[in-house]
Image (cartoon, rainbow, N blue to C red):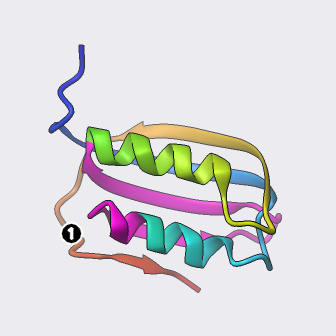
Amino acid sequence: MTDSHEIVRAHVFVSGVVQGVGYRAFVCRQAEHHGLTGWVRNVVDGRVESEVQGNREAVDTYLRDLNRGPMWSSVEHVAIDWMEPGSHESRFEIKY
């Protein structure tokens, strides 16, 4: 059984139609809504990459949001790697 208040960090790659459709802005809004820290950026191969950190329940909800995406996106796959939490961030940002 996992503790919903446990702090976790996930590294994520999202594939599908996720660039040029407002996906990064959607991800940033969702992370901020859930009180998470981290970042999101486009990858040259067409995927979107993100690292996110916060309590387990909020991160799990964020990951479900990534599968949905904004209206014009079409998410095919979300690959998640769990990482050790860090303490170097204070907000969520879009990286360019």
Q: Residue 67: horizontal and vertical position, in percent?
A: 64, 46
In the image, the segment drawn in magenta is 31-55
| Image quarter of the C terminus | bottom right
Q: Quadrant of residue 74?
A: bottom right
Q: Residue 80: horizontal and vertical position, in percent?
A: 54, 39
Name of the residue lying farthest toward the front: 71
Picture residue at 22% right of the left edge, 56% below the top:
86
Type of residue at label 1? His
SS at mark 1 in the image: loop
| Image quarter of the N terminus | top left
- Left or right of 79? Residue 95 is left
Relative to residue 79, is residue 47 depicted above or below? below
Picture residue at 44% right of the left edge, 58% below the top:
51
Picture residue at 32% right of the left edge, 60% below the top:
34
Q: Residue 19: horizontal and vertical position, in percent?
A: 78, 72
Relative to residue 16, is residue 72 depicted above or below? below
Q: Within the magenta stretch, is there residue 6?
A: no
Relative to residue 58, is residue 41 depicted above or below? below
Q: Which residue is mark 1?
A: 88
- Toward the viewer: 83 or 6? 6
- Left or right of 29? Residue 8 is left
Q: Residues within 10 Å of mark 1 (few under 14, many from 20)?
A: few
- Left or right of 8? Residue 25 is right
- Left or right of 51? Residue 75 is right
Picture residue at 66% right of the left edge, 51% below the top:
68
Q: Within the magenta stretch, is there residue 48?
A: yes
